[in-house]
Amino acid sequence: MKTLLLSLILFGSLSSAYAHHSFGYHFDVDAEVTITGIVKEFKFINPHAQVLVDVTAEDGQVETWVCEFRGANGLARTGWREDTFRPGQAIEITGFAARRREAECYFETAIMADGTRISQDDPLGGDLYAASATAVSSTSAADGDVPNFAGVWGQAPGMGAGMAAGMGMGRGPTLGGPNRFEYVLSEAGQRALEAYDPIVDDPSIHCKPPSLTRLWGTGNPTEITQEDGLFTIHHEWLDVERKVYLGLSEHPEGTTDRVMGHSIGWYEGSTLVIDTVAYEPSVLFQFPGLPTSNQLHTVERLTLSEDGRNFEISWTAEDSEYFTEQLSGNSRPLQRLNTTLRPYNCTPMEVA
């Protein structure tokens, strides 16, 4: 069996990162729009905040526009709050037009009545996290032979493409571009791909995580705890919690399928190996789509650095029903962060 190697790299974003789904599938970078109106409501929610603006046309008719942002958690870490925009405020917004709805855009900048200019890229204060400078033991205090992964991890500002990339995946795949991984699919996988619409079937639109590759690549922080026999990974994004059962040589018989599967793990020196089966059908990549069946089997390797301040992530994926080859890849290394996780409280999105 051949192995396809790829990397999950955080792309530089258009302005601020579009962490939830691929920018080009929903908005047109070549169609800039400017609207002037009155703020009706500011929805400070995840996965995307929204400002609703009542715009009055020349004929006196009022139309409500909806302009999206990145998620509330990312905005809050740069000082945004629920009352950054308040009902009744006069506002001029410049953004990028939605592809399917006329009165919708992706927010770039706003100019308020007093001339104040606000951009998603402008920090307004907040508790923006940074890489931890505190010395950390690379092994657990309870067991000197066990690598110490306990703590909060993520992409700190300044990594890769900077703060914007640190908040998400950036633009992602181009609308209408080739599906680079389609060739790996079996006939059954091809049928599943043909039935998949990335606009409406993307699991994250419905507040379900698509895959482990997406979880490690959102840019939201992740907290890890270690106990005897249990390694717990709490991803802030979508409030996903994964439990890895240590000390098991195989998965229990009769394990039921679940969104993120059933995971067992073991240590190999400074590496934690996570073996996962019993996934529900989903997609490994949302755009343009790489479907997976309940036969998906993944192996992740989390390797801690000598100083204990960062770890690398590599993975393999096999699917005896949908794949003809094994896939393998890696995500950008994570650093220890000085922050705490925030509740995500995902709000399902409406798509047309």
Image: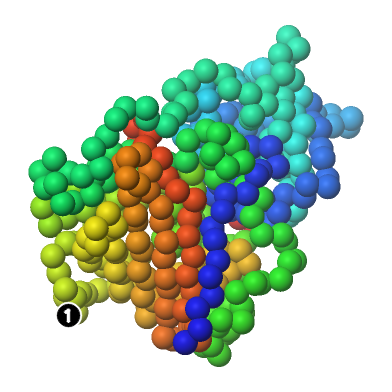
Point out the residue furthest to the front here: 306
Camera-side residue of 146 and 115: 146
Secondary element at image label 1: loop
| Residue 59 found in image quarter | top right
Q: What colour scheme has been applied to the protein in the rendered image?
A: rainbow
Camera-side residue of 42 and 163: 163
Residue 21 in the image, given as x and y percentages of width and height: 58, 53
Residue found 71% across the figure and 71% down from its top: 178
Residue 326 in the image, given as x and y percentages of width and height: 47, 79
Camera-side residue of 201 and 216: 216
Point out the residue furthest to the bottom here: 187
User: What quarter of the picture does the C terminus occupy?
Assistant: bottom right
Amino acid type, callout 1 = Glu
| Residue designated by label 1 | 253
Residue 329 in the image, given as x and y percentages of width and height: 49, 65
Residue found 72% across the figure and 61% down from its top: 175
For residue 139, side relative to residue 170 (left or right): left
Position above or below: 156 against 113: below
| Residue 118 found in image quarter | top right
Residue 264 in the image, given as x and y percentages of width and height: 22, 66
Residue found 52% across the figure and 55% down from its top: 205
Position above or below: 63 against 178: above
Residue found 17% across the figure and 62% down from its top: 246
Camera-side residue of 348 and 331: 331
Point out the residue furthest to the top here: 114
- Graded by Cα atoms within 10 Å as few (under 14), some (14 to 19) or many (20 or more), the crowding at tag 1 reads few
Residue 207 in view: no
